[in-house]
Image: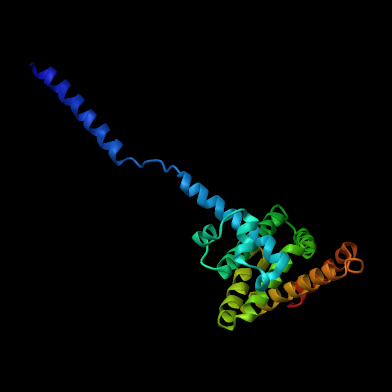
Amino acid sequence: MSQSRQEVVSSRRTTKTKVHEQRKTAPVPRVESRQHQRTAATRKALLEAAFHVFVRDGFEASRIEDIAAEAGRSRGAFYVNFSNKAEVFLALRDQQFRAWQDKFRKRLQGQTTREEQRQAVEEHMVDLALDKSYILLELEFKLFSIRHPRLLKRLAKKHVEAKREIDELRDLHPKGFHGTLSMQQTVLTWEAILEGFALNLAFNPDVMTREYIESCMPQLARWVLDSNR
């Protein structure tokens, strides 16, 4: 075989070897297994069912069987995803909080002036006060924490820290307002207002009407935002 032909053959072999090595080392695209998809779908269904059951019956009265039945799943399927009722409750509450946090941030997007931002906050507050299910779940979370003293301090600390980490909320306050205690007090003041409105709206909707809440909220929101000037 001539030298030139040997070089061509050698080059082809080298190229094939490189391609083979690249195929071996290249990352294989991850394909989600059907089992993983089924597990994710079951978890999603259980969380949605838990939302309805906890809002309807409260944490203490609700049962794992009720959640599984509402989701159309077995008790065994529940335990594959959650170890107990408290775990699904806390997972659900965290999910709902993050969903409302995302809504709040989207509402503030594009609001450039302080007045526009404040108006967005007022609208958000009204929506929260009118969201009976969300507020009832928040109240259940606080009652759950109070009834479990060993968890209370940790859950209360985590709760205010999560709210304080929302940069958009901090930016709405007066300049220099970044004290940890002041921010935590403000967070709980917001919630006291919201929960009071929502609870009384559910209790007596003929008196605590949407129109009344919409008329009160701007003044209350501005008072809270300006209270630490």
Count of marks overlaid on the render: 0
Residue 154 image-quadrant placement: bottom right
Residue 58 image-quadrant placement: bottom right
Q: Position of residue 203 (x, y in %)?
A: 84, 71
Is residue 4 visible in the rendered structure shown here?
yes
Q: Residue at x 77, y 70 (%)?
A: 194
Q: Residue at x 69, y 78 (%)?
A: 185
Quadrant in which the C terminus is drawn = bottom right
Please give left or right for residue 102 compared with residue 32 in the image. Answer: right
Please give left or right for residue 221 compared with residue 45 in the image. Answer: right
Q: Residue at x 60, y 57 (%)?
A: 46
Is residue 176 visible in the rendered structure shown here?
no
Please give left or right for residue 59 compared with residue 121 in the image. Answer: left
Coloring applied to the structure: rainbow
Q: Position of residue 96 (x, y in %)?
A: 65, 61
Quadrant in which the N terminus is drawn = top left
Q: Residue at x 60, y 54 (%)?
A: 45
The residue nearer to you, when weighing 19 against 33, is 33
The residue nearer to you, when weighing 164 against 149, is 149
The residue nearer to you, when weighing 55 against 173, is 55
Q: Position of residue 71 (x, y in %)?
A: 62, 55
Residue 92 image-quadrant placement: bottom right
Point out the residue furthest to the right here: 206
